[in-house]
Image (spheres, rainbow, N blue to C red):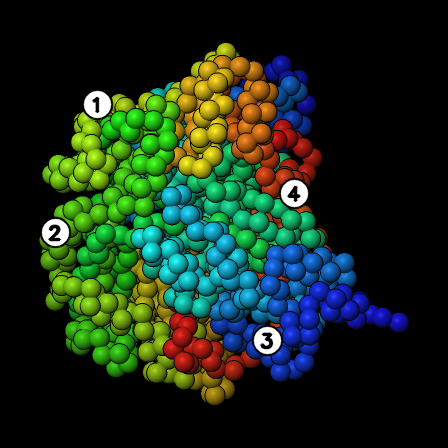
């Protein structure tokens, strides 16, 4: 057994990764560390760097599926998919910071496309992982439709390395819209933006993304054939009662690439908080009072919060609203904050997959 | 002295009035089997709860007395997933069919497990919303069953399966512990426990409340039907559509035998000399869809179709679908009995899978009709046989098993949407190795050490009720449910 101070284990193959996990009584896997809080091993846990497990194993564009090793950078995946006009429609964030496929699964973070297409959980098809008992296990499959066995691929989304070490995953992909255009519209207030998001959500408009800010600014992204945009944006302007301001091309791309705030260092706490249009107003008032910056994405289903105070204060705030959150960056500590749901179920799954507590607890 | 069943029955009688605690032969008979009528078993009792507290109380009593139980809705499972356990309790949830909340602003519905699939879309329609998963038995199947077996439908490539539309749920675990998983948000922090629960095939207990995501009803549908001389051409056309970057809501193929049957049954006006028919449907925002449809028509025109028809209005669109939707019951007219499988292959292997199924069919002299969800590679071979002929059922089962093995060999799955249930337990090891299965067993035991909840489903071991051949389900004969 090694001491925690030992340099990170760096397996180059799945077999080496199995050996590395078996060699450690306490271990936590991570990729590039673009989400530093979930990537940091708690005291006494060795670090397992899975970036050596990199590469796309299978990709057949006509199947809309690919399989890749967990340490494959999102940027590599995105570039290969783009060559065939495809993408992961949930827009996994932090690719520029080196984020890997495995880290995206383990943290369960999705970007702007979440609202329309679904998130990591909706595109993952299969997973290979190393259990706490040191077994190499496969769950799910490689085809877009499969109902055989328990849905382990979904369980691993957001599992934070605490149920097993993901070494390989299969995903469904979609054709990428040929062009995008974004309408920026000022609704005037958060409440007006919430009302607009609700109306737009039930409207027949197909949006690639529906985001808004605490000041009421709406960001509405359309995709498809560029020649349809003028007519669609005009209709949208009429629906909203204001023409808004239009962004296309590089301006549109850059805006959305930076829409999910990048995680910072230990001094900068960034958290993802699942919310609803109903829970946002009370939460937003508390966040404003605490001086936190926030952006709302996925049609009002997620809040990205930059929190200026200690993590336990955010934990208390979230608990008071019955919300839970995931800390991506900030002072070292537990990544999950706020209310815990389904503990009785999670505890049993943890006991089955990691009976000896080789991985950290939640 | 009282035996455990007596004590259990006494306990159940304290909760359920005699009208909701069925004990006699006539009361139990309708619950002996499900949509896969080949399996049946006689339960000890059936309870008809009307509230979540009653479900929880029933599960706790079963646990206290170590008596197995099966929760069920309308019993449309095609894999024997809701067949009772001999001597066990059936918790029949059809009376718990309320839509507890329908919130058009957040596009969610909170429903009880006995709510019928289409009832949700009907209730949501006034807000221009619908519930997307559309298993073919949707007019009677319930959300509880859809959740337990992760039901699919014709639109899975674009919209996913049941699990992609369940945001959260409240469940009673097999030992009576109640857990709330997920919530009303599309997003989640921590492991996706809701996703893990959906598709548990009843092994993790009973969902008593489910939070569903609703979608806006598409503004426009554009549908075309193409006829081909060879089924492989239809398969290739599907690959072309996918490669073009279009994302149809549905792509369905029927082969000659299925076309003939559908035409004879419902006179849908399909080209009667075609060997294969492909239906492709795009849907979404009007302007975007109409632009995509022009591309689709150009593309299909170059796939060697002998005839292409475009639905001019909704009536014609429904006519295209009428034949497709009736294909299963129609095939039933060609043969006294049939088995349907729902294996999946990668789309690129559809042509090869169909050729191999065709040669197995010819070699063994067993007719097979093919109707399938081409967009997601989900086959539905209908294996025709006459159950009165000695050995015919066994020969049909053997062919069905070989088709499943073929699906796995081609890189697919033994089941796309029906689940493993009782029917395909023997084939789970075709997909997963001993370690994978051991880990799944360990998860099962951690959640239900006594294996009380839907005992005997999914996993290869365990007791199985007798295989028999009683013919088609009465509702299927009546044309109410379909096996796809």
Q: Residue at x 64, y 52 (%)?
A: B173
**Distance of label 3 from label 1 (alpha carbons):** 63 Å
Kind of element beneath mark 3: loop
* Residue B186 spot, x, y in % from top left: 43, 40
Chain letter of disc 3?
A: B
Chain letter of disc 4?
A: A
Q: Name the residue under label 3.
A: B32
Q: Residue at x 26, y 47 (%)?
A: A204
Q: Residue B26 versus residue B299: which sits nearer the camera?
A: B26
Q: Name the residue under label 1.
A: A251
- The earlier-in-sequence mark between 4 and 1 is 1
Q: Name the residue under label 4.
A: A344
| Crowd rating for badge 1 (residues with CA inside 10 Å; few <14, some 14–19, many 20+) | few
Kind of element beneath mark 4: helix
| Crowd rating for badge 2 (residues with CA inside 10 Å; few <14, some 14–19, many 20+) | few
**Distance of label 4 from label 2 (alpha carbons):** 53 Å
Chain letter of disc 2?
A: B
* Residue B45 spot, x, y in % from top left: 68, 72
**Distance of label 4 from label 3 (alpha carbons):** 33 Å
**Distance of label 4 from label 1 (alpha carbons):** 47 Å
Whether residue B216 appears in this view of the structure is: yes
Q: Which residue is drawn at 50% across and 86% down?
A: B390
* Residue A221 spot, x, y in % from top left: 25, 34
Q: Residue B135 versus residue B107: which sits nearer the camera?
A: B107
Q: Name the residue under label 2.
A: B294
Q: Which residue is drawn at 28% across and 29% down?
A: A187
Whether residue B59 appears in this view of the structure is: no
């Amino acid at each position: 057994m090694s001491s925690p101070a030992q340099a990170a284990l760096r397996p180059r193959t799945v077999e080496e990764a199995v050996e590395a996990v078996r060699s450690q009584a306490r271990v936590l896997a991570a990729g590039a560390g673009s989400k530093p809080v979930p990537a940091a091993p708690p005291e006494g846990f060795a670090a397992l760097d899975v970036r050596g497990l990199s590469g796309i194993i299978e990709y057949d564009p006509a199947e809309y599926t690919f399989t890749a090793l967990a340490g494959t950078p999102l940027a590599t995946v995105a570039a290969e998919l783009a060559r065939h006009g495809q993408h992961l429609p949930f827009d996994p964030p932090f690719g520029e910071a080196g984020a890997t496929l495995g880290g995206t699964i383990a943290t369960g973070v999705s970007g702007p496309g979440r609202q329309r297409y679904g998130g990591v959980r909706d595109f993952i098809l299969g997973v290979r992982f190393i259990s706490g008992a040191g077994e190499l296990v496969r769950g799910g499959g490689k085809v877009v439709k499969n109902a055989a066995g328990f849905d382990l691929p979904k369980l691993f989304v957001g599992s934070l390395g605490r149920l097993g070490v993901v070494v390989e995953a299969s995903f469904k992909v979609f054709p990428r819209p040929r062009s995008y255009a974004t309408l920026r519209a000022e609704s005037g207030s958060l409440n007006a933006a919430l009302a607009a998001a609700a109306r737009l959500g039930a409207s027949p408009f197909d949006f690639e993304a529906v985001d808004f800010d605490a000041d009421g600014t709406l960001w509405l992204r359309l995709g498809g054939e560029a020649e349809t945009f003028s007519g669609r944006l005009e209709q949208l302007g009429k629906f909203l009662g204001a023409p808004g301001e239009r962004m296309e091309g590089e301006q549109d791309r850059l805006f959305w690439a930076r829409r999910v705030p990048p995680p910072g260092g230990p001094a900068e706490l960034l958290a993802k908080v699942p919310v609803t249009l109903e829970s946002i107003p009370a939460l937003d008032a508390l966040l404003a009072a605490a001086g936190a910056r926030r952006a709302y994405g996925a049609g009002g289903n997620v809040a990205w919060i930059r929190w200026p105070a200690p993590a336990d204060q955010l934990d208390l705030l979230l608990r008071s609203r019955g919300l839970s959150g995931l800390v991506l960056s900030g002072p070292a500590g537990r990544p999950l904050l706020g209310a815990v749901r389904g503990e009785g179920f999670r505890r049993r799954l943890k006991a089955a997959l990691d009976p000896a507590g080789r991985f950290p607890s939640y | 002295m009282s035996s455990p069943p007596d004590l259990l029955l006494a306990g159940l009688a304290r909760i359920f009035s005699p009208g909701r605690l069925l004990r006699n032969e006539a009361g139990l008979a309708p619950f002996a089997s499900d949509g896969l009528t080949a399996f049946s078993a006689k339960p000890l009792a059936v309870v008809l709860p009307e509230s979540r507290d009653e479900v929880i109380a029933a599960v706790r009593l079963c646990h206290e007395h170590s008596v197995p139980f099966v929760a069920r809705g309308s019993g449309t499972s095609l894999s024997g997933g809701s067949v009772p356990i001999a001597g066990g309790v059936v918790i029949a949830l059809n009376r718990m069919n309320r839509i507890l909340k329908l919130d058009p602003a957040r596009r969610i519905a909170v429903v009880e497990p006995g709510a019928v699939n289409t009832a949700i879309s009907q209730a949501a329609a006034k807000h221009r919303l619908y519930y997307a998963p559309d298993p073919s038995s949707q007019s009677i199947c319930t959300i509880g069953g859809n959740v337990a077996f992760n039901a699919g439908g014709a639109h899975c490539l674009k919209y996913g399966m049941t699990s992609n539309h369940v945001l959260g749920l409240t469940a009673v675990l097999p030992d009576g512990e109640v857990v709330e998983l997920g919530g009303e948000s599309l997003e989640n922090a921590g492991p996706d426990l809701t996703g893990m629960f959906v598709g548990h095939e009843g092994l993790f207990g009973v969902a008593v409340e489910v939070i569903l995501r609703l979608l806006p009803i598409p503004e426009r549908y554009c549908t075309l039907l193409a006829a081909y001389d060879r089924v492989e051409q239809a398969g290739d056309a599907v690959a072309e559509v996918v490669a073009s970057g279009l994302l149809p809501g549905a792509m369905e193929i029927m082969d000659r035998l299925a076309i003939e049957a559908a035409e004879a049954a419902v006179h849908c006006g399909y080209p009667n000399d075609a060997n294969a028919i492909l239906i492709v449907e795009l849907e979404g925002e009007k302007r975007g869809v109409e632009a995509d449809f022009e591309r689709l028509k150009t593309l299909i025109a170059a796939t060697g179709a002998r005839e292409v028809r475009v639905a001019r209005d909704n009536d014609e669109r429904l006519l295209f679908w009428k034949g497709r939707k009736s294909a299963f019951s129609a095939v039933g007219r060609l043969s006294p009995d049939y088995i349907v499988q729902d294996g999946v292959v990668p789309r690129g292997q559809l042509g090869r899978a169909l050729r191999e199924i065709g040669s197995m069919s010819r070699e063994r002299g067993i007719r097979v009709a093919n109707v399938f969800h081409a967009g997601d590679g989900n086959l539905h071979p209908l294996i025709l046989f006459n159950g009165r002929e000695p050995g015919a059922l066994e020969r049909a089962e053997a062919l069905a098993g070989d088709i499943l093995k073929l699906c796995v060999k081609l890189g697919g799955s033994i089941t796309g949407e029906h689940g493993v249930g009782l029917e395909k337990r023997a084939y789970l090891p075709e997909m997963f190795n001993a370690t994978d299965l051991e880990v799944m067993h360990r998860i099962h035991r951690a959640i239900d050490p006594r294996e009380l909840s839907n005992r005997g489903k999914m996993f290869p071991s365990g007791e199985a009720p007798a295989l028999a051949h009683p013919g088609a389900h009465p509702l299927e004969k009546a044309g109410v449910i379909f096996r796809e």
